[in-house]
Amino acid sequence: MKEIQEQIMRLKKEKNAVIMAHYYVDDAVQEIADYVGDSYYLSDMATKVEAETIVLCGVSFMGESAKILNPGKRVLLPDVTADCPMAHMASVEKVRRVREDYGDDVAVVCYVNSTAALKSVSDVCVTSSNALKVVKALPNPVIYFIPDKHLGSYIAKKLPEKKFIFNDGGCPVHTMIRPEDIHEALKAHPAAKVLVHPECPEAVTELADYAGSTSGIIDYATASDADEFIIATELGVMYELKQKNPDKSFYPASALQICEDMKKITLDKVLSVLNRDDAGLDMTEELMEKAHAPLKRMLELSR
Ligand code: 13P
Ligand code: SF4
């Protein structure tokens, strides 16, 4: 084990901290994490761990969610500038206007890749692994889905009985993946299964053998009899895919599948935040209280 990893392990014990990481962060960070998972798993685990401190290796909305669900714990972000651009792609004002237009008929469904302010005006949160289950369980006939239009329309296609209002937001990384990329990759690997994240545009998810969250993609590839897979999501998932399936082959759909914000999290920054002990989160008590209800409702509806 490298010296820096040993230092992190020692400090983690001293400070009664656990390290949680998303599948998109660097391999070296996933390697030292106590818990690695998709966005749903990280929010759910944050409510279950006993340690006093959680070091959240991911983008800031993940740290915010962990803190909102655990106001009593210290949540540390190794780099406060690691921020998901999509988290800001909806407006509180527009949510108010939609509520005025549709009254009690509408449920505002907020993908967790969103700011705490957007969560605080929403009825329920979802992640890509539970969105279908959660939205299906809602009694409202109208769904205003924020901020991701691609995940929103993916779910809408499966629930034709509901009217969906979409918001013009999307993940810059997944939006860059094109159907041509999948066709090219299939030309090179015709026997491969195509595994796609639903943050991709509809023209890409339509070509998928499986579409789902990062955990869903990893589970599908692990359970599959196929030997080759084309992967249309951020390349950080390759680490766990290869760990679990050393004899299978994984090919990126595009070389552009890299989230610069997730890659800001390094071992040096994990060590540094454990030494500093400063949280890096800036939310008022009132905001946290308001954002808590939709996150809690998501956990209840998806269990
Ligand atoms: P999941 O890990 O929940 O699939 O989320 C993907 C993502 O973009 C997180 O930022
Ligand atoms: Fe946000 Fe996309 Fe990066 Fe996920 S991959 S954190 S949605 S920019």
Image: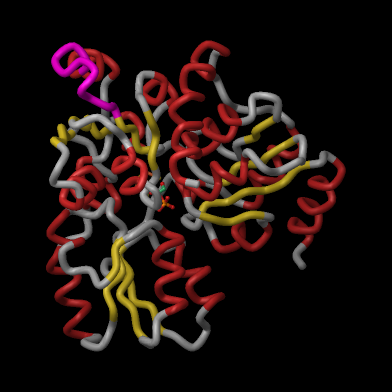
Which residues, given as a range, are shown in magenta? Answer: 99-108
Image location of residue 227, percent across then percent down: 38, 87
Residue nearer the viewer, 7 or 143: 143
Residue 116 percent across, percent down from the top left:
44, 24
Report the quarter where the N terminus lies.
bottom right
Left or right: 11 in relation to 39? right
Question: Up-down: is 230 above or below 73?
Answer: below
Residue displayed at 36% across by 49% down: 128
Q: Position of residue 260 (x, y in %)?
A: 41, 48
Q: Residue at x 14, y 42 (%)?
A: 161
Q: Quadrant of residue 140?
A: top left
Q: State the residue at coordinates (40%, 72%).
A: 220
Residue placed most toward the observer, 90 or 257: 90
Chief secondary structure of the magenta span? helix
- Residue 251 percent coordinates (x, y): 34, 76
Residue at the farthest right position = 14
Check the image and tell me how it is coloured: secondary structure
145 vs 179, left or right, is: right
> Against 224, is 92 above or below?
above
Between residues 279 and 5, which one lies in front from this camera angle?
A: 279
Give above or below for 35 relative to 186. Answer: above
State left or right for residue 163 relative to residue 137: left
> Magenta span has 103?
yes
Question: How many numbered callouts?
Answer: 0
Q: Which residue is drawn at 36% across and 42% down?
A: 134
Residue 182 magenta: no
Which quadrant holds residue 294? top left
Report which quarter residue 255 is drawn in: bottom left
Judge from the rendering whether residue 148 lies leftward or rightward of residue 220; answer left or right.
Answer: left
